[in-house]
Every structure is written in structure tokens, then in C-alpha cells.
Amino acid sequence: MIIPVILSGGSGTRLWPLSRALYPKQLLSLIGEKTMLQETVLRLAATDDIGPVYCVCNESHRFLVAEQLHEIDVNIGEIILEPKGRNTAPAAAIAAMLVTEKHPGAIMLILPADHVILDTLAFGLAVAAGKSAAEEGGLVTFGIVPASAETGYGYIRASVQPEGEKGAYPVAEFVEKPDRETAERYLASGDYFWNSGIFLFKAESYLLELEAHAPAIVAACREALGKAVADLDFLRLDSEAFCASPSDSIDYAVMEKTTKAALVPLNAGWNDVGAWSALWDVQERDDAGNVKRGDVLVHNVKNSYIHATSRLVTAVGLDGYIIVETADAVLVASRDSVQDVKALVEELKKRERDEVEIHRRVYRPWGTYETVDFSDRFKVKRITVNPGAALSLQKHHFRAEHWVVVKGTAQVTVGEKKITLIEDQSTYIPVGEFHRLENTGQTPLELIEVQSGSYLGEDDIVRVEDRYGRQ
């Protein structure tokens, strides 16, 4: 049996402003209708003998990850919550410990949640080609057949030149990102492959090699798992123990040190979508070489990627540009400079801008809210509560709230009272009063919330009861 382990802990800062810390690229629909996380799971249909899906994700993304997995009706083995990102080696170790316990002898297929693979059949064949080596104790990595002399990827050299892209070949070396001249030489040799970050190995085999080469990671992960607690749909690792683990990748911790590394060539339209230019590369372009998403109108524009999410975006006389519009930010960059978006994000962090963390529309386990307008003393939100969902029973120290229902039916708790509100009805929540909003109906509840007070920050919430386990 092959157990897929989806690593969904990244933040995708190079795809800002669409990708943000609390809503990163793997949770976005960047190529088709499904999100990148969902596409990663769905392409497993081309692979035989697949077992339940394990997913390792950031604690702050847990409800979004669970919702997206439930939407595609996947057999979930475990959703493992990382209290803090420690790179891929500890994440895979936690999954391996669980798989060893629940599925002895199973093979793990380690998959980043934010990659594009256009040819799912070729991907399934490559996994099948590596299965025998994994069953014999090998640690298989998938090397992307290079289409160009890329300097942004690490490379893997096979010990012999692969023939026909079939089977697993011993790894001779891993090499860092090369300069242009070196990359050209790698491409011409036929011995080098891009490092994909996709792996196939028995859970037991990985743990043995990790114990040999990075025992501190194993010790920290065993303690974190031993003290883990179940929380709704999730497995919550012990924070102190997990954060004590060294932060290291599977490559550095194991693959570059083991004698059991093997490479399977993969030629399946792979892209790690590391920058906006990658989305221009992998999507269908019009006759002028443009990719346009959303409400976009252009004149004399060529070879550009333009993405509108909330309004009309127009462009004139551009060649080779990236334009990405969201409700609260706009990015304009040349295609050659998109790697520098990360520097913009770092500057926004220094300035403590909210646009780094969240979109104007914020997702919660009960639904969403979107800030419509705000000033020093007031804030207006549009709130949507999913059918059967409820906000926590809470109070605020500094703000009062006025709720106006615009669609659906709300059940509202204010102090000791419970009232039902329908469209065009409203209620007032005084400062310091405990309150709760529930949607007991079958359709989404929509309302406008007007906050007023001396402080309107999201941290002014005192929860006394929450069905989603939030503090």
C-alpha cells in the first residue's frame, strides 16, 4: 500500500498578493477550479494501491485544509498540525511514525501540496517505476527531466545515464542551484535532473536513515507525537517538543547522506510554481502570449500574466509584465523580476502591514468576513455564516456591535436572551456583553456588522465557548 503524505505547510510569499500567510498558495485555485492542495490529492487517482491520505499543515490553516479535503471526499488518515514549521524532514518523520504504527510495511509518497503536474498518467507511471526500489529499502526521489538550463533549482545526478525514463537509478550526488554556465553543462550531459522534492520510501526505511543521520529530529518528533492530542479532525503535536527539533529538509537530513538514494526520472509537466512567471509558463496563452484571469481588458499587451479578483483591470502597451489585483493590494512587475516579490513581502513585514497575513476576506471555520470600510472609531464588515455553523460565545472589552441581517435567518444570543432575526432585522451588542451568532438554517446567513469603540482589533475577543476548539 502507498500512503500519500501531503506537505502543506508553506506560505508561498513569492505569489503575494494572492498568497498570504493565513491563506497560502496551496489553498488557492491558481490553475483550474480546484485548489493546488486538492489537485495534489486528485492526481493520485492515476496511481495504484493508494491508501488514506495524511496531511501535515500549519495549525492556522487547519480548518481550510480540512474543508478542502472534505470537499473532494478523500479518505483522510490524519491531519497533523505543526505548531511551527521545521522544514520537511520533521514533518515526514511524524507521518512515518504514524504510518509505521497504523500501516506496517506501507510505502509513503511524500508530496508538496503546491506543485503543478500536468500529466497525471506519467506521474502515476513514475510512482509505479519507483515502487520496487522503495519496497527493497531504497529511498526514491523523483528527478524532473530538465527542459531548460534553470538556475533556480537544485539538481540531482544519476550514477548512470537513465534510458527511456524507466526504473530507479542510483544517485551519484545532489548539487546546489548552479550558475548559468554550469546549468547549461548539466542540461547537455543528460545525467542531471531538477530536484522535485517528491519522495517514495517505506516509512520504516526513512526512520532508520533519519535515526542514523539526524537522531535529534527523531527524538524530538517521537516526544512531540507521544504528547500529541486529538482535536476534532486534527492531531495536535506537542508544541515545545516539536519546536525543539532541528529544522532541516529531507534532502539535507537524509538523502544527501544515505547510500540508499535512488532516482526515478519524471517527465510530466512539473512546475513548483515558485513565482508568478511560473503561472504564465504552465497556463494556456492567447495569440498575443497573454494569460488573463478575471475581469481583464488589454490593448497592445503581449507575453503578460494579468489576474483580477475584485474589479476590472486594464492594461495598455505592455510586454512581459505580471499584474495581480486583489481587493486590498496590486502587484505590477516585469516577468524577469518576480523572484524579488519576496523582498517586497519582507518590507511589508517590517512595516507590520496586515496585507502580509490576511486578505480583506478572512476565512474562519464558521464562514468568512470581509472588511468593507473602517476608520479610527468604526469598522464595517460583511459576515457570511455557513449553514449549521456558529461563532464562539464571546465578548469584547472595547467595542460594541450592531448586526443587520441581509440574507437568511440568524439565531442570536445576547446575554441571557436568545432572539431570531430574519432579513432586514437587526440587534445591538453592548460593550462587554456575551453574545453568539448562529445559522440554524439550510442556506448561508449574510449580515452587516458595524463595530464602534476605542479599539477595534481582532485580538479583542474573549471566548468562553467554541465548538471549533479555538482558545
Image (cartoon, grey):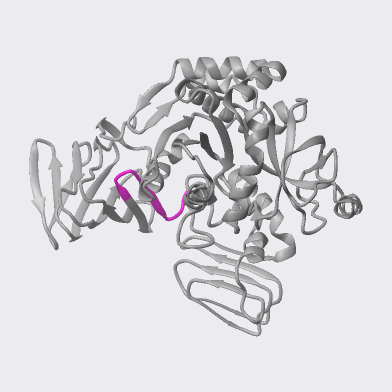
Where is residue 89 shown, x and y percent of the image?
63, 29
Residue 208 appears in the figure: yes
The structure residue drawn at horizontal position 43% and vertical position 34%, both measured from the top left corner, is: 79
Residue 182, position in %: x, y? 90, 49
**Quick one: 401 or 255, which is closer to the camera?**
255
Q: Residue at x 28, y 50 (%)?
A: 452
- 356 to the left or right of 333: left
Quick check: 184 left or right of 28?
A: right
- Where 350 sits versus 305, above or below? above
The percent coordinates of residue 466 (x first, y second) are 26, 33
Residue found at x 26% / y 51%: 386
Q: Is residue 468 magenta?
A: no
Is residue 8 in view? no
Is residue 365 part of the magenta span, yes or no? yes
> Camera-side residue: 24 or 89?
89
Q: Quadrant of residue 119?
A: bottom right
Q: Looking at the image, which residue sits at the far bottom?
A: 299
| Camera-side residue of 283 and 297 | 283
When asked about the image quadrant of residue 202, the answer is top right
Q: Quadrant of residue 63?
A: top left
The quarter of the image holding the C terminus is top left
State which region is magenta. 358-367
Q: Is residue 287 left or right of residue 168?
A: left
The number of discs equals 0
Nearest the eye: 79 or 162: 162
Question: Measured from the top left, where is residue 74 in percent x and y?
Answer: 40, 44
**Does 72 appear above or below 432?**
below
